[in-house]
Amino acid sequence: MRIALLPGDGIGPEVAAAAARVLRELPLDLELEEHLFGGAAIDETGEPLPAETLAAVRGADAVLMGAVGDPRFEGAEVRPEQGLLRLRSELDVYANLRPARGDGVDLLVVRELVGGLYFGARGVREDGTVFDTMEYRPEQVERIARRGFELAQARRGQVASVDKANVLDTSRLWRDVVERIAPDYPDVELRHLLVDNCAMQLVLAPAQFDVILTENTFGDILSDVAAGVTGGLGLAASASLGDGRPGIFEPVHGSAPDIAGGGIANPAAMLRSAALMLAHGLGEPALATKLAAAVDSALAAAPTPDLGGTATTSEFVEAVLRVLGR
């Protein structure tokens, strides 16, 4: 199986190397190929997503990505994050999965990823007004909703569909489509929440949630809130899936340029993303469970400085490998 490894920027290469080391120790026939992406790609080619990288990604079974972002490009016309948005669009990975676990909480945010405000028409009018447009087609809502219901069927059978239907036409469409397809999943309990209420409920009582289904912008925000109540962004992983391969698997944390090169980056989120890749991208759920459990054990046995410990990135990886018996 071919894995396109996109190390990216800042601590990205360090956590990507950690993931590669662990993956190569698993009983799998994997071929990992590194490719330029993000700020590093801009430096080399002038583009955050070079044509060569896109071609390699299209031919891969999965994409495993480090962190993207470089303060050198803030406000620039060409920025690393543009490559990420384009990659998601090119691969049509419309379903972003953001699990959040800890302290009695086990929820999954299912976020629509290639529509809505981030991909709608935008611009500046002659009078200086700036606009961004939120747009959704019914079929875009239906496919992400079906993915959310299907994932709930394999969990606890509960979907909280989140919108702002009291204000937004796009949210009224969202709610109508979700209601229409819900009868196709009689074993799943559906409820609707307004996004502001959902945010409050996530803070006050996160254990009530199983699957949270929502559109792009709301999902971006709510998944960070969910991460915040279960350990923080530094531990959060994500999977971005389409209807076929490849999916994109990446940690949620930033590139942390202030600690890049110090050998102290926490690779837990990257390794958890690799576990999601095994489960959702490569059809290896048993190995995914073992890797995720090994990461949990390493977090307790060898915490890195961001968690109050002293372990280096390499020492954390060794702790993971010990649990895996490698």
Image (tube, helix red, strand yellow):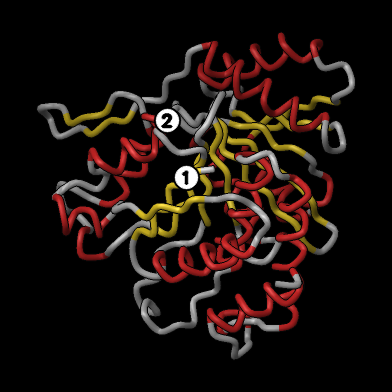
**Viewer-side residue, 203 vs 59:** 59
- Left or right of 78: which side holds 1? right
Residue bearing mark 2: 91
Image quarter where the N terminus lies is top right
Compared to residue 12, the image places residue 259 above or below, namely below
Q: Which mark is residue 210?
A: none
Residue 269 can be seen in this image: no
Q: Is residue 102 left or right of residue 78?
A: right
Disc count in the image? 2
Mark 1 and mark 2: Cα distance apart in space:
10 Å
Residue found at x 69% / y 61%: 229
Observer-nearest of 125 and 307: 307
Callout 1 secondary element: strand
Can you tell which mark lies on residue 63? 1
Please state the horizontal and vertical placement of residue 208, each as a whole percent of the image: 84, 45
Marks 1 and 2: which is nearer the front?
1
Q: Residue furthest bottom?
A: 310
From the top left corner, tell me how far across and down residue 52 is, in percent: 25, 41
Residue drawn at point x = 54 percent, y = 39 percent: 240
User: Is residue 194 shown to the viewer in this render?
Assistant: yes
**Marks 1 and 2 close (CB-CB < 8 Å):** yes
Q: Residues within 10 Å of mark 1 (few under 14, many from 20)?
A: many
SS state under label 2: helix
